Image (spheres, grey):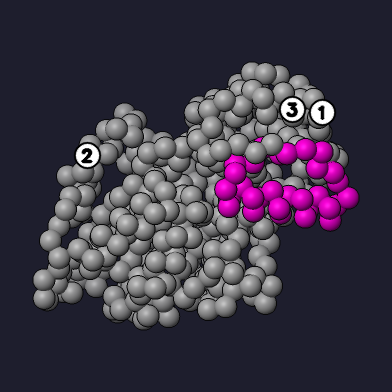
Amino acid sequence: MKRITRRDFLKKTTAGGIGLVAGLGGVPRMVKGAEKGPIPILNLMPFSGAYADTGLDTSRGTRLAIEEFGGKVLGREIKLIERDATNPSDSVRRAKEVVEKEGCKFIQVGTSSAVALAVSEYGAKNGVLIACHAGADKLTGEACNKFTFRWQVSTYGAIREVVPQLIKELKVNTFYTFTPEYVFGEDLLRNTKDVLKEHGKELVGNSYHPLGETEYSSIITKAMAAKADCVMFLNFGADTVNAIKQAVNFGLKKVSKLCIAWSGGQTEFQAMGTKILEDIWVGIQYYHTIDTPMNRRVVEAYRRRYGVMMPYTGAQGYQQIRVMLDAIKRAESTDVMKVIAAWEDYEYEALTGREVYRKCDHQCIKPYYTVRCKTEAEKKAPDDFAEIVGSSKHILPCDKTGCKM
């Protein structure tokens, strides 16, 4: 099957794509009676910059979920609108435009935690339901609100799965971290420090870098000099790809074990290749080999349509929109408050098994996974990059999150 490139995909989808109503151009305000017309859903994801691939993959998963609903819910056509989430202020402006011009009441947003926090706040103030894809703890903590739901396990749960696995399996005692200098990176770093302290291990150093960094040589030199047992990369997307490639080429793997704490999975793996990845440990929200009936079915559907195995960011788009549409269907309404009530505490069959968004903070209760990247000799297929070696659910109790709805 011919692989669809990001450029080809965006060219095709600007005209409405896979049977959905086109929604990429300027559209007049909704007229009276439009509540019986198409239901607009905004996919506000990065289609440019360091996280561009996540926008493409999330869009693919979203479209697959809409297709499985027959392109309609409550007998009304689903109108998917897509905008580039570049930074917090521009993303809020784009969300506002679509809400006001299209009457949109449902938004999916990511990947930056800063963007998600800003759009979540906008949604709460304007009665718009926000399905967010970002890891910052405060999204379902002190910045939570009634209108925002989050599928991802937070950085709290991610680090509490990955770091103990490293300590147990690799027998490592000292750590060095690469951290992007914004809220997501800070949360990962804070949780890493807490978990290392709990286990009596030492963080011997940390280096910050800006989002979208391309040159890591000075940071890598510091990490090599520290001679930590394990170097953890707390970045994501293109930042991780660039940092890992340079680190391996500099010989860091000969000095320390390497771990990516929060990975995009297949998309990043394909960009790096097996030679770079072999024996690197990775934390991830989802992997396509998860053995559940739903995951096996959806992975095959994704592969047939796009020619690749479904990456984590494809899964996030599929799963969260699928649950949103199901909540609209069960609410028998697009009234946001009714949809929220239908979504809260509803347990459903998911890619990772049984999942539920708890009412107290709208955090999805699901596993976080650790995988080990394979050597070339271990691979059974070109896209067989890793094996799942562990998973767990670490979610703060409701009374500990700081969330007050």
Gap between marks 2 and 1 measured at Cα: 49 Å
Which mark is first along the chain, 1 or 3?
3
Q: Name the side, left or right, on which 159 lies relative to 106.
A: right
Q: Position of residue 346 (x, y in %)?
A: 48, 75
Give residue 401's quadrant in the image.
bottom right
The residue that mark 2 highlights is 12
The reply to whether the magenta stretch includes residue 60 is no
Q: Amino acid at mark 2?
A: Lys
Which numbered mark, 3 or 1, is in the foreground of this view? 3
Gap between marks 3 and 2 measured at Cα: 45 Å
Q: Position of residue 144 (x, y in %)?
A: 53, 70
Residue found at x 78% / y 53%: 195
Q: Name the side, left or right, on which 342 lies relative to 194.
A: left
Secondary structure at numbered mark 1:
loop
Q: Is residue 6 above or below residue 24?
A: above
Q: Position of residue 207 (x, y in %)?
A: 69, 36
The reply to whether the magenta stretch includes residue 189 is yes
The residue that mark 3 highlights is 222
Q: What mark, if any, has residue 227 been given in the picture?
A: 1
Which span of residues is magenta-colored? Answer: 177-206
